[in-house]
Amino acid sequence: MKKLAALFTVLLLFCSARASEPFTVGAKGAVLIDGASGRVLFAQNADEMLPMASTTKIMTALLALENCELTESVTASKNAHGVPGTSIYLSEGETLTMEQMLYGLMLRSGNDAAVAIAEHIAGSVEDFAAMMNRRAEELGVDASYQNPHGLDAENHAASALALAQIFRQALQLEDFRTITSTQRKIIPWVGNTYSRVLENKNRLLTTYEGATGGKTGYTSRAGRCLVFSAKREEMELIGCVLNCPTWFDTATVLLDYGFENYRMKTFLEEGQFVVDAEVRGGLDGTVAVRASQSLQAAVGLDEHFTVRYDFGEGISAPIKAGDPVGRAILEINGETVAQCDLLADESVEKLTVGSALRRVLENWVALFS
């Protein structure tokens, strides 16, 4: 009966997702974003700060990869050994590499691994939590951390949108991609005759076509929480559901909605010539401008988009090749969803008597050489 009830719930979600927009899902907070631009494709109470359980560990892993080498030795203290909840059963004084700790953190969701990593980086859980909050502020996301593992604590909360954005940032690191997409990993178990076998708790890796990673979380206060991602063709989608009883089923519905209703479009390639922009006071009157990076976004089948070039108050010489001189701004349905710097492809000297004479001489020499 429970299986039938769950199937019925999924069918209702499936139908509602396709019948009309907006639709709702059975989560207290939910969001789906485009991995390329960060554009929000679906949101349901996505900005409310909610308990996040072990999805906390995404930030823990991000900081570890940004501040450490995978080969560093990490030793479990008494604090790490004694932390309650899910565990990889670290012994006090046991040492693993940072890479092995991260697999224990992300696949098995080891709270002991989280504390070991935090103390290795910052010296204490409290100082590491301060690092987490500073990084969240740098990313401009609504998240408040009190610990590196996600056990319930006062003021330990994040929005669904924040967690999706943090996961998007982490996915830019290839080592994180490798870890979060791994289904099974064997790491040493010091003092035992056998190794630790870690199974990824993210069921989507085996049930959803194109799944690229994610992180589960659960406490009685937070309920079931899931951050997830999947990629098909050129489009990667990232989502989060908080306090969601049907977490994997709801994630499937959201991903299906995204893949069926949006397509990835590349508006500018990295290094692509954009325009010859006017230069004031320059030895040359224009400068070739190129895109600093790809400008991409998921676009709905019936949505209207435009790319405009913003050069502020104009470009004035002198300019060095590679200098940012403006921005390409992508707007969809009148809303800015992505932008990239526009770079000068060449240097332009300031127009002076000396530079003008030198140019005349150079042209003269070139003409008769």
Image (cartoon, grey):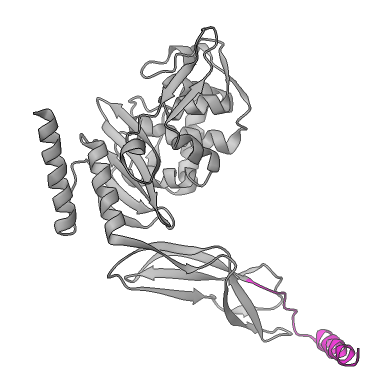
Image point (33%, 56%), residue name? 40
289 sits to left or right of 8: right
* Magenta region: 344-369
Figure check: 329 above or below 45: below
259 sits to left or right of 267: left
253 sits to left or right of 281: left
Judged by its main secondary structure, the magenta piece is helix
Provide residue 169's location: percent of width, then percent of height: 47, 46
Image point (17%, 49%), residue name? 14
**Which residue is nearer to you in this view: 246 or 80?**
246
In magenta stretch: residue 347? yes
In magenta stretch: residue 62? no
Q: Quadrant of the N terminus?
A: top left
Q: Quadrant of the C terminus?
A: bottom right
Image point (16%, 46%), residue name? 13
293 sits to left or right of 18: right
Residue 155 visible: no
Provide residue 111's location: percent of width, then percent of height: 42, 22
**Splitting the image into 4 quarters, where does residue 71 fall?**
top right
**Which residue is nearer to you in this view: 136 or 205?**
205
Provide residue 146's location: percent of width, then percent of height: 41, 29
**Which residue is nearer to you in this view: 16 or 142?**
16
Provide residue 235's location: percent of width, then percent of height: 40, 56
**Splitting the image into 4 quarters, where does residue 99 fall?**
top right
Figure check: 31 above or below 102: below
